[in-house]
């Protein structure tokens, strides 16, 4: 085994999720393929990244719909690294991203927790 390629993020709607991740967060849409059964294979990842991406998977039943926004039980579940914390923080705020705290400067780097459009918690993090 060499690396994790994708992590699934359950969403309510493909188009609203793509719009948020590519617009507010500045991710790239890597793939959007119709699977012929009403579902799509939708992959986004941070612009310029060669690492893992997110597979945006539309919830198919009540159990999956209930997990949207709560996939990690309210904990920070996703960590978005940046090389320009101040610039990305300001750009994301201007795009309407909801930050849950003011930026902190810790021993390990600069960090602020934000929520995606469904309430999943993320760290915006510039490692020290």
Image: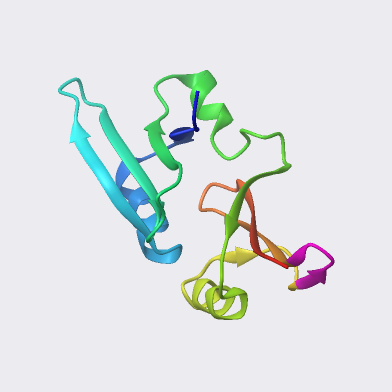
Instruction: Compare residues 99 and 106 and report the one nearer the observer.
Output: 106
Location of residue 127 (image quadrant): bottom right
Instruction: Compare residues 94 and 6 and report the one nearer the observer.
Output: 6
Residue that lies at the very extreme toward the left in this rendered image? 36
Instruction: Compare residues 124 and 62 and report the one nearer the observer.
Output: 124
Q: Is residue 113 left or right of residue 89?
A: right
Rendering coords of residue 107 (x, y %): 84, 66
Rendering coords of residue 60 (x, y %): 39, 22
Query: Which residue is painted at 50% across and 23% down in the image?
Result: 1
Up-down: is 11 above or below 115? above
Rendering coords of residue 46 (x, y %): 43, 56
Rendering coords of residue 128 (x, y %): 73, 68
| Colour mapping used in the image | rainbow
Q: Is residue 119 left or right of residue 95?
A: right
Query: Which residue is painted at 19% across and 35% down in the image?
Result: 33
For the magenta stretch, what is the residue range?
104-109
């Amino acid at each position: 085994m060499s690396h994790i390629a994708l992590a699934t993020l359950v969403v309510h709607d493909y188009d609203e999720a793509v719009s948020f991740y590519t617009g507010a967060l500045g991710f790239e849409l890597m793939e959007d393929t119709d699977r012929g059964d009403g579902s799509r294979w939708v992959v986004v990842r941070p612009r310029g990244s060669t690492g893992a991406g997110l597979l945006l998977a539309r919830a198919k039943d009540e159990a999956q719909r209930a997990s949207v926004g709560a996939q990690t039980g309210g904990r920070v579940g996703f960590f978005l690294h940046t090389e320009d914390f101040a610039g990305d923080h300001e750009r994301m705020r201007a795009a309407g991203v909801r930050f849950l705290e003011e930026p902190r400067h810790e021993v390990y780097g600069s960090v602020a927790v934000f929520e995606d459009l469904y309430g999943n918690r993320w760290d915006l993090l510039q490692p020290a």
